[in-house]
Image: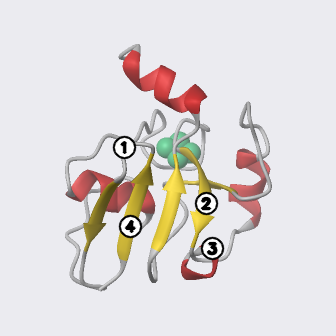
Amino acid sequence: MPKVTFLPANETFEFESGKLPYKEHGKPESLLDVAMNFGFHLEHACGGSCACTTCHVVVKAGQANLSEMEDDELDRVEQAADFQLHSRLGCQAVVKGDVTVNIPEWNRNYVSEGH
Ligand code: FES
């Protein structure tokens, strides 16, 4: 049962691999898919198609429990305003085990402004 924790809200969601209903945004069982299944807001302006950076998160723990970054994700996430060593796109990173991610302040502002 992988557990995903989103910071700074510090909300944790647990699901059974292969059993998460797909919410049609991002890759199935991606961080975005998990967030949507549990009603947690993670911005996703492009609908989870690796065409924006609004779902940018920074992995704090459990990096090895996410799918490996593919070239299209790397090309895109490098354009995030605050790209960091452990940056990922929430819609592309598929959860395979326990992971903790931080939603950067820039994204949080974006959310609170209601765009
Ligand atoms: Fe646009 Fe993830 S939602 S790249």
Residue contact between numbered discs 1 and 4, judged by CB atoms under 8 Å: no
| Residue linked to disc 3 | 63
Q: Looking at the picture, which amino acid does disc 3 mark?
A: Gln
Q: Is residue 35 visible?
A: yes
On the image, the x and y values in percent for residue 21 come to: 19, 69
Percent of width and height locating residue 36: 27, 52
Using residue 65 as the reference point, say whether residue 83 is left or right of it. right
Q: Earlier in the sequence, mark 2 or mark 1?
A: 1
Q: Which residue is mark 2?
A: 59
Q: What is the x, y in percent for residue 95?
A: 45, 74
> In whole angstroms, how far apart are the C-alphas of marks 4 and 2?
11 Å
Q: Earlier in the sequence, mark 4 or mark 3?
A: 4
Cα distance in 3D space between marks 2 and 1: 14 Å
Is residue 26 among what the camera can see?
no
Q: CA distance from mark 2 to mark 3?
A: 6 Å
The circle on residue 4 is 4
SS for callout 1: loop
Q: Residue at x 49, y 21 (%)?
A: 109
Residue type of the residue flagged with mark 1: Ala
Give left or right: position of 70 versus 93.
right
Q: Position of residue 104 (x, y in %)?
A: 58, 38
Element on which disc 4 rests: strand
Q: Which residue is mark 1?
A: 9
**Residue occupying the point 44% across, 78% down:** 98
Q: How is the image coloured?
A: secondary structure
* Nearest-to-viewer mark from 1 and 4: 1
Which class describes the residues within 10 Å of circle 1: few (<14), some (14-19), or many (20+)? few
The residue nearer to you, when weighing 98 against 55, is 98
